Image (cartoon, grey):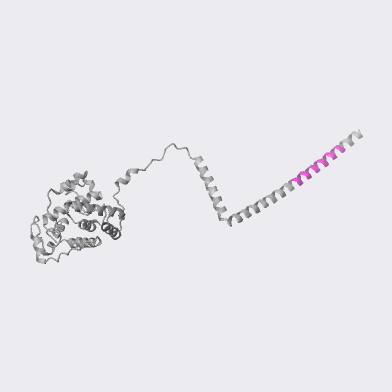
């Protein structure tokens, strides 16, 4: 019996010693792992700091890293977005160039190019569309026996080469034609909306200008008819146009025309009192300006040849 009690005491002491040794071992292992973790994290932090400092000194490496990060983020964003089967519309139109009112100034004659470049600089517009208008003014002017520089001068004074200009009274386009009044002239070009096509507005404006000069009997009076001041003071409109025309003539290598003298106040008063249908007689100054020669055929017939 005594031997059994002694055995039990021995086993208990061994178990106590074993548990104590195990707890000490585990505690030492835990402390060791904690120290290793601390040291590893410290080494990792030092490595990160060192890499950041190294990358900061290398611009190429920094940019490459930023590009790689952005690409990764973009890929993740696209992966989260639902797949779309909608295809982007094709807005291209290879034939759109046919609608452009433009010509290379190099394709013009020397006189036309000089006028086009000067107009582009003076009125702050692109030389290509102005070159097309200069080319058209020369072509139409030759067909209807009208000085092309006069046509361009009217456009300059009327709209400063803005094809979408509109006055408070409804004059529209480059030559500020009263579209509602002359809508019949636009029928040959598809309708009144053609007033905003630069070439069409030029051609219709030439028709109106030619009719005004023929009705008034002189260039100066015709310009006054054109601006709607046949029986009143035109505010210097005719003089402005003729001055502009002389500048363009000199640029084109032509001889400048004599400007009209200031009309006496008595004559202006007589014009104001005259009936609206009266035709202003040419003055001595305006007789020296080139007058439109009479040609066979009507104006619409000549313009029809341009289309």
- Residue 26 is inside the magenta segment: yes
Q: Quadrant of residue 25?
A: top right
Q: Tell me the quarter of the image containing the C terminus.
A: top left
Q: Quadrant of residue 187?
A: top left
Q: Tell me the quarter of the image containing the N terminus.
A: top right
* Residue 34 vs residue 189, the one in the foreground: 189
Q: Quadrant of residue 246?
A: bottom left
Q: Residue at x 91, y 34 (%)?
A: 3
Q: Residue at x 11, y 54 (%)?
A: 215
Q: Residue at x 20, y 50 (%)?
A: 203
Q: Residue furthest right?
A: 2
Q: Main secondary structure of the magenta part?
A: helix
* Residue 210 vs residue 12, the one in the foreground: 210
Tally the numbered discs. 0
Horizontal and vertical percent position of residue 204: 19, 50
* Residue 199 vs residue 172, the one in the foreground: 199
Horizontal and vertical percent position of residue 85: 44, 36
Instruction: Answer whether residue 242 is visible to the viewer in this image.
Output: yes
Residues rendered magenta in the picture? 9-29
Above/below status of 3 relative to 284: above
Instruction: Report whether 91 appears left or right of 69.
Output: left
Q: Residue at x 16, y 46 (%)?
A: 184
Above/below status of 240 relative to 77: below
Instruction: Report whether 190 appears left or right of 19.
Output: left
Instruction: Answer whether residue 177 is visible to the viewer in this image.
Output: no
Horizontal and vertical percent position of residue 202: 22, 51
- Residue 152 is inside the magenta segment: no
Horizontal and vertical percent position of residue 299: 15, 49
């Amino acid at each position: 019996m005594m031997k059994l009690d002694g055995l039990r005491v021995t086993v208990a002491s061994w178990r106590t010693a074993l548990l104590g040794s195990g707890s000490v071992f585990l505690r030492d292992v835990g402390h060791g792992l904690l120290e290793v973790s601390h040291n590893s994290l410290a080494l990792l932090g030092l490595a990160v700091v060192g890499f950041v400092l190294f990358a900061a000194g290398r611009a190429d490496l920094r940019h490459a890293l930023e590009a790689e990060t952005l690409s990764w983020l973009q890929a993740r964003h696209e992966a989260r977005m639902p797949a779309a089967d909608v295809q982007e519309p094709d807005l291209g139109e290879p034939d759109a160039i046919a609608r452009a009112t433009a010509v290379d100034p190099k394709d013009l004659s020397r006189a036309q190019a000089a006028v086009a470049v000067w107009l582009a600089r003076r009125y702050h517009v692109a030389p290509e569309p102005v070159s097309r208008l200069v080319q058209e003014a020369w072509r139409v002017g030759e067909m209807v026996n009208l000085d092309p520089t006069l046509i361009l001068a009217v456009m300059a004074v009327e709209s400063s080469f803005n094809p979408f200009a509109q006055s408070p009274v409804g004059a529209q386009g480059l030559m500020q034609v009263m579209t509602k009044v002359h809508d019949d002239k636009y029928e040959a070009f598809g309708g009144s909306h053609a007033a905003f096509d630069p070439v069409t507005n030029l051609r219709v404006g030439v028709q109106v200008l030619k009719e005004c000069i023929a009705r008034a009997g002189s260039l100066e009076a015709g310009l006054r008819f054109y601006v709607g001041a046949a029986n009143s003071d035109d505010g210097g409109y005719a003089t402005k146009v003729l001055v502009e025309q002389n500048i363009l003539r000199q640029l084109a290598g032509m001889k400048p025309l004599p400007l009209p003298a200031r009309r006496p106040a008595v004559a202006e008063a007589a014009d104001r009192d005259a009936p609206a249908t009266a035709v202003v007689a040419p003055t001595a100054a305006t007789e020296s300006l080139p007058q439109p020669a009479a040609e066979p055929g009507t104006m619409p017939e000549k313009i029809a040849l341009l289309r």
